[in-house]
Image (spheres, coloured by chain):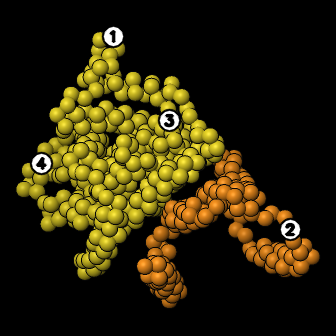
């Protein structure tokens, strides 16, 4: 029992540190990437004993600044809700990762360990449910600040998040129908199947429309890129105007963590999770671990190397998707609010519904 | 392990009842709405203890993610809600006694006559079973509920559009 408990705590620690590290790298990458794309140098001043590490030290300086900055509570603001809002923006994001597998099931000394914190039959629902709690951070921040503009900003952000949450949920139904399970772990295993023996059954191949709907919806959920109206710090008064110091930092840590988590969801559902094409472990190919290519070639690889390759492949996919989100963010101009709403309800929603109907029909005909 | 189960169960039970008390008695409606979040969350936790995993996730997804957000939106958009005095005194105590006694008696009978399975159930995934039942045995109620929701949707749209036209 203590071993099990220790394993769970260990897995939680790995995931938690992974997300925090991802968010930390993002704060740096965001500044450097935006500088690169607008032909600037970007953060390069902060240094510890002359070591700058291409500006990574700036992220440390940013964090220190936020911790020591005055924590301002607006007069007549609601003290309790004002303090609770950033927590609500941050903690559900970390919890959503629990159902995502970050590697295959491994066997150590006869003990089977799935590299997934929670193996839930309703995994995808859990993910969406906890994702929806993040709305409360924005909503309460808007109200507790006792500022009319902030309240409007909070409601604007909430309306955006709810609208796109719907698209997130609807676009996930297609892959769920194809893989026949709500458990991301099962989805991951299913993606090592092959169409006609040689095309990997990844979500992006069997459900391309769902992928194209999910990616922008995910970016709207993180309030990133063309969808950053809730913040637009320098132009619009948003929900976080009355926040400073570490509380403001928590909103943005939550947001960066959300980028990492949604990149992981995208990788899990659409990019084959931890699978590497044509790589099988010993259990899947009668004791012959390694690459089994469709033209019959076989490249044997040690069992531990298969596991390592798979964990590595998941990490690389998440990093690529994070980079992709950042690239889009600095490429496209911001939507106007009515455009934002129209895209969600009038354009993406009918496509998402049609995708579900067509997918259901095909799944029924094939089965 | 059994002790841990009990501790977690009581945590959820206290969370549910405690936040429900706040919902009823807090004088500021925004705090009531906020406390309702914890009530829904606690109830979802209790569903998990009943091995109803699908129900628990759906509870959070629909009630916390959807309905409560709309309630809070309603609070935000109500004019002068901060100065609104929500009465907490009691009126007509003796008349109220009649429904209270009736409801209490009804609940007591139900509690008394139901056979409560006390042994912890082994955890079974329920999603597939629920899905199959909804599309076979309970198809008609399921479709009726859908029609009801559709009617409400169209009705809400009609009302909103009606007033917009009159303002022009």
Tell me the element at label 1: loop
Asked if residue A278 is positioned above or below residue A58 in the image, the reply reads below
Residue B74 position in % (x across, y down): 57, 66
Q: Which residue is mark 2?
A: B90
Whole-angstrom CA distance, mark 1 to mark 4, is 52 Å
Chain A, which colour? yellow
| Disc 4 from disc 3: Cα separation | 58 Å
Between label 1 and label 4, give the one nearer the viewer: 1
Q: Earlier in the sequence, mark 4 or mark 3?
A: 3
Against A18, residue A338 (above or below) is below
Q: Quadrant of the C terminus of chain A?
A: bottom left
Element under disc 2:
loop
Q: Residue at x 19, y 37 (%)?
A: A38
Dot 3 corresponds to which residue? A244
Q: Is residue A354 visible?
A: yes
On the image, numbered disc 1 is attached to which residue? A49
Q: Which mark is residue A298?
A: 4
Q: Tell which chain the image draws in orange.
A: B
| Marks 4,3: beta carbons within 8 A | no
């Amino acid at each position: 029992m203590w071993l099990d408990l220790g394993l769970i705590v260990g897995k939680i620690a790995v995931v938690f540190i992974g997300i925090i590290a991802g968010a930390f790298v993002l704060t740096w990458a965001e500044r450097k990437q935006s500088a690169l794309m607008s032909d600037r140098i970007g953060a390069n001043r902060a240094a510890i004993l002359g070591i700058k590490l291409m500006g990574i030290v700036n992220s440390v300086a940013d964090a220190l600044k936020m911790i020591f900055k005055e924590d301002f509570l607006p007069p007549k603001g609601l003290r309790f809700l004002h303090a609770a809002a950033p927590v609500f923006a941050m903690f559900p994001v970390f919890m959503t990762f629990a159902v995502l597998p970050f590697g295959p099931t491994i066997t150590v000394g006869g003990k089977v360990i799935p590299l997934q914190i929670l193996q839930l039959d309703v995994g995808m629902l859990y993910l969406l449910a906890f994702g929806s709690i993040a709305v409360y951070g924005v909503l309460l921040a808007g109200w507790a600040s006792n500022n009319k503009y902030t309240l409007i900003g909070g409601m604007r952000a909430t309306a955006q998040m709810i609208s796109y949450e719907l698209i997130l949920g609807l676009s996930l139904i297609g892959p769920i129908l194809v893989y026949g399970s709500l458990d991301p772990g099962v989805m991951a295993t299913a993606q090592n199947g092959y169409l006609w023996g040689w095309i990997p059954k990844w979500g992006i191949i069997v459900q391309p429309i769902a992928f194209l709907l999910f990616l922008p919806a995910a970016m709207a959920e993180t309030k990133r890129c063309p969808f950053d109206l809730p913040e637009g710090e320098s132009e619009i008064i948003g929900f976080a105007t009355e926040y400073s110091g570490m509380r403001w930092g928590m909103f943005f840590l939550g947001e960066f963590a959300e980028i990492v988590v949604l990149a992981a969801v995208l990788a899990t559902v659409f990019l084959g999770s931890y699978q590497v094409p044509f790589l099988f472990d010993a259990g899947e190919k009668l004791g012959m671990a390694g690459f089994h290519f469709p033209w019959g070639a076989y490249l044997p690889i040690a069992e531990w190397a298969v596991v390592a390759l798979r964990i590595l492949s998941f990490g690389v996919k998440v990093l690529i998707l994070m980079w992709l989100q950042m690239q889009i963010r600095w490429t496209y101009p911001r939507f106007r609010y009515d455009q934002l709403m129209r895209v969600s309800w009038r354009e993406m929603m009918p496509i998402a519904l049609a995708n579900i109907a067509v997918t259901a029909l095909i799944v029924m005909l094939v089965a | 392990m059994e002790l841990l189960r009990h501790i977690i169960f009581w945590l959820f039970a206290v969370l549910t009842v405690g936040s429900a008390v706040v919902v009823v008695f807090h004088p500021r409606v925004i705090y009531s709405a906020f406390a309702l979040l914890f009530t829904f969350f606690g109830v979802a936790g209790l569903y998990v203890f009943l091995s109803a995993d699908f129900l628990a996730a759906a509870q959070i997804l629909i009630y916390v993610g959807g309905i409560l957000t709309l309630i809070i939106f309603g609070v935000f958009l109500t004019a002068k809600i901060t100065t609104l005095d929500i009465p907490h005194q009691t009126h007509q105590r003796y008349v109220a006694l009649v429904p209270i006694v009736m409801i209490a008696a009804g609940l007591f009978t139900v509690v008394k006559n139901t056979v409560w399975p006390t042994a912890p159930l082994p955890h079974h995934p329920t999603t597939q079973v629920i899905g199959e039942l909804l599309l076979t045995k309970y198809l008609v109620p399921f479709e009726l509920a859908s029609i009801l929701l559709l009617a409400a949707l169209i009705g809400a749209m009609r009302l909103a559009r009606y007033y917009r036209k009159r303002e022009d």
